[in-house]
């Protein structure tokens, strides 16, 4: 694209879309074109708060943009995303990319046919703790991820696997980079018609194991990632963006060590402070300009969604599901 400002708009101004608009309206190199929300009252309220334009229709917004971010409810991702892509407009769609693998494949195909960028909003890729751990990663072999949150109505149109666990499914696919050989899972609905708490155990073709728990019915909020690899152990707090790496000292077997401190050295993981959503949106803008590759492609989003669907299928086939009335 040319060197002028990139015209960007936001579709859907709920909890996530509001922040998309908040960040984009003040981003250098971006000409913020406004918002569209199917609820005109909500659109007017957000437009007033952010001092921007609420367009009367999706088409009216798309007439004025080179790129758009879509943060509508998950069941509408495919339909709205296709409306954007079919006009040759670059798209960042919030996670999950769609509510079905077929919908995800439609989006990936449409982006390829139009030759435009499709990015998926797996914002944890930009988490400060994940960025800080990246230089030390060396084929992690055991991963434990717990993502717990108190109940809220938003997101309950889908199971917790598509609402919360999808973040971590994408992360483990990126961290392990191997084919998933086996999926075992269990989960139950508690406060919504869909599964509200779930655990999944993934076995990868290279021998790695990932154990994931996601809950939206917990008392406290927590996002923790622990990883073991041959050179040491990571403990990451994704909520705080902090982490530690306990690295085995070279030649520790010959040191005659009697205490753990003599075997490992503590590395406090550091990365520049930055809002993950801002980093994600900046990466999208650079990708649309052709300045870098897409960080989370449509294909990567479809892969995470496919794995999420395997988790859902495993839950439905589990003895716990069979025992429910």
Image (cartoon, grey):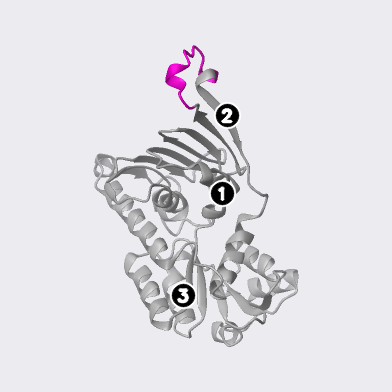
Tell me how far mark 2 sits from mark 1, CA to CA: 18 Å
Tell me how far mark 3 sits from mark 2, CA to CA: 45 Å
Where in the figure is residue 203, as x and y percent of width and height? 30, 43
* Left or right of 298 on screen, residue 271: right
| Position of 188 relative to 260 (above/below) | below
What is the secondary structure assignment of the residue under circle 1?
helix
Where is mark 1, residue-wise?
A: 131
22 is within the stretch colored magenta: no
Q: Residues within 10 Å of mark 3 (few under 14, many from 20)?
A: many
Task: Read off the magenta span.
Answer: 250-261
Query: Mark 3 and 1 residues: CB-CB less than 8 Å, in contact?
Result: no
**Quadrant in the picture for residue 129:** top right
260 or 160, nearer to the observer: 260
- Residue in the picture at 46% in, 55% down: 163
Asked whether residue 289 is in view, the answer is yes
* Left or right of 142 on screen, residue 221: right
Asked whether residue 36 is in view, the answer is no
Q: Residues within 10 Å of mark 1 (few under 14, many from 20)?
A: some
- Residue 81, numbered label: 3
* Quadrant containing the N terminus in the rendered view: bottom right
Mark 2 and mark 1 lie on one chain; the one further toward the N terminus is 1
Mark 3 and mark 1 lie on one chain; the one further toward the N terminus is 3
* Left or right of 3 on screen, residue 103: left
What is the secondary structure assignment of the residue under circle 3?
helix
* Quadrant containing the C terminus in the rendered view: top left
Where is mark 2, residue-wise?
A: 266
* Left or right of 159 on screen, residue 282: right
- Residue in the picture at 59% in, 87% down: 60
What is the secondary structure assignment of the residue under circle 2?
strand
């Amino acid at each position: 694209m040319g060197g002028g400002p990139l015209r960007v708009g936001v579709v859907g101004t709920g909890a996530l879309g509001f922040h998309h608009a908040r960040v984009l309206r003040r981003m250098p190199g971006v000409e913020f074109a406004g918002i569209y929300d199917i609820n005109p009252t909500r659109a007017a309220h957000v437009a007033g708060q952010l001092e921007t334009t609420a367009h009367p229709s999706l088409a009216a917004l798309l007439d004025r943009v080179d790129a758009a971010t879509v943060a509508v409810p998950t069941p509408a991702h495919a339909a709205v995303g296709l409306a954007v892509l079919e006009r040759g407009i670059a798209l960042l769609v919030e996670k999950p990319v769609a509510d079905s693998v077929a919908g995800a494949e439609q989006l990936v195909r449409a982006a390829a046919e139009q030759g435009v960028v499709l990015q998926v909003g797996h914002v944890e890729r930009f988490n400060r703790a994940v960025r800080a751990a990246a230089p030390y990663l060396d084929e992690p072999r055991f991963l434990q991820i717990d993502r717990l949150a108190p109940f809220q109505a938003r997101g309950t149109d889908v199971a917790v696997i598509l609402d919360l666990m999808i973040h971590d499914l994408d992360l483990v696919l990126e961290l392990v980079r191997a084919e998933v050989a086996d999926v075992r899972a269990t989960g139950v609905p508690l406060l919504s018609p869909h599964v509200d708490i779930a655990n999944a155990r993934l076995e990868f073709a290279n021998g790695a194991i990932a154990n994931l728990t996601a809950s939206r019915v917990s008392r406290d909020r927590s996002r923790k990632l622990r990883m073991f690899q041959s050179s040491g152990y990571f403990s990451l707090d994704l909520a705080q963006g902090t982490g530690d790496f306990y690295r085995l000292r070279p030649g520790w077997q010959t040191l005659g060590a009697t205490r753990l401190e003599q075997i490992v050295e503590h590395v406090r993981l550091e990365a520049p402070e930055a809002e993950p959503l801002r980093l994600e949106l900046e990466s999208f803008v650079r990708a649309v300009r052709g300045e870098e590759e897409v960080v989370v492609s449509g294909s990567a989003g479809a892969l995470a969604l496919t794995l999420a669907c395997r988790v859902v299928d495993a839950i439905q086939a589990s003895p716990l599901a069979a025992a429910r009335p």
